Image: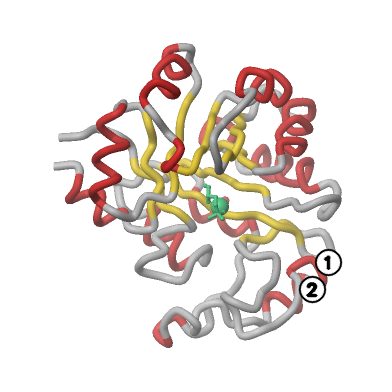
Amino acid sequence: MLKNLCAAHRGWSSRAPENTLAAIKMAANEPDISMIEIDVQMSKDGIPVVIHDYTVDRTTNGTGRVGALTLEELKKLDAGSWFNSAYAGEMVPTLEEVLRETMGKVKLDIEIKRAGDWYPGIEIKVAELVRRYEMVSDIMITSFNHETIHTFAKIAPDIKTGNLIYGFPVLVDEVLDYTKASVLSMGYEYLTEEFVRPLLNRGVEFVAWTIDDPKYMREIASMDERIVICTNYPERWFSARR
Ligand code: G3P
Ligand code: CA
């Protein structure tokens, strides 16, 4: 049996609306899910909230940019009905609510979504929450915004971080050196054995996303058992690994 750990992408997002407490609780209660990936942005009034897109349009009944809405406005939105009417009334959770729900149960991969100069100060707010809920050893912070990871290393050098990369990786040593990250979280299509093996052997950790096809789950997992399989369909991995 393949031994790679499983990360549930946006919670158990094939079974419940992504990035909601319903999807997160479902994943947190499955012992074979080691980590839950979530996306964090900031409300207009500076509260870290869990939602993927930069607008609320796709995953709620509202419209507009996440950062243009206050927490009170975000909390009025229905973040469940778009997925299934059984989830009507699910809300956009705050990061704090997610930490409360997951502490002591499961690890979290907190992806900070930060385009350009949006969400100033999000790094310190996330770090403070992680400390308040004593989850430093259960958290990794990831971002496509490598400047955010560089900032994190300065303000919270004890919190594990990772660079998100989608595309053929170049200047990897320089990026790791600049950001002080210990994880590469990559689009699985760009992973090759020649690339990952020496880095794994140097202690760099790998997360591969978003693998929903059992064929590719097995292919990536067979490269090395240390690569975490991040998927919207944990149930497929449970069958594929056998
Ligand atoms: O964990 C990485 C993966 O979630 C990045 O892509 O667009 O799903 O946030 P995206
Ligand atoms: Ca993400």
Whichever of callouts 2 and 1 sits on the residue coming sooner in the sequence is 1
The amino acid beneath tag 2 is Leu
Q: What element carries label 2?
A: loop
Query: Residue 82: image x %, image y %?
Result: 50, 82
Which residue: 65% across, 55% down?
Answer: 40
Q: Cβ of disc 1 within 8 Å of ligand 1?
A: no
Q: Looking at the picture, which amino acid does disc 1 mark?
A: Lys
Residue receiving disc 1: 44
- The quarter in which the C terminus is drawn is top left
Q: Is residue 35 above or below residue 10?
A: above
The percent position of residue 113, horizontal first and vertical second, equals: 68, 52
Frontmost residue, 191 versus 159: 191
Q: Nearer the viewer, residue 113 or 133?
A: 113
Residue 181 falls left or right of residue 48: left
Q: In this view, does 46 lie above or below 222?
A: below
Figure coloring: secondary structure
Q: Residue at x 23, y 48 (%)?
A: 215
How many numbered discs sit on the rendered protein? 2
Give whichever of 118, 88 is nearer the camera.
Answer: 118
In the picture, the disc for residue 93 is none
Q: Is residue 125 above or below residue 61?
A: above
In the image, what residue occupies the spot 50% across and 79% down?
80
Instruction: From the image, tell me which residue sits under label 2.
Output: 69
Q: Quadrant of the N terminus?
A: top left
Write the residue at 47% across / 41% down: 107
Locate residue 227: give its quadrant: top left
Q: Where is residue 209 in the image (x, y as percent from the top left)?
A: 44, 46
- Element marked by disc 1: loop
Res 94 quadrant in image: bottom right
Is residue 116 positioned above or below 180 on the image?
below
**Residue 179 picture location, percent across and down:** 70, 26
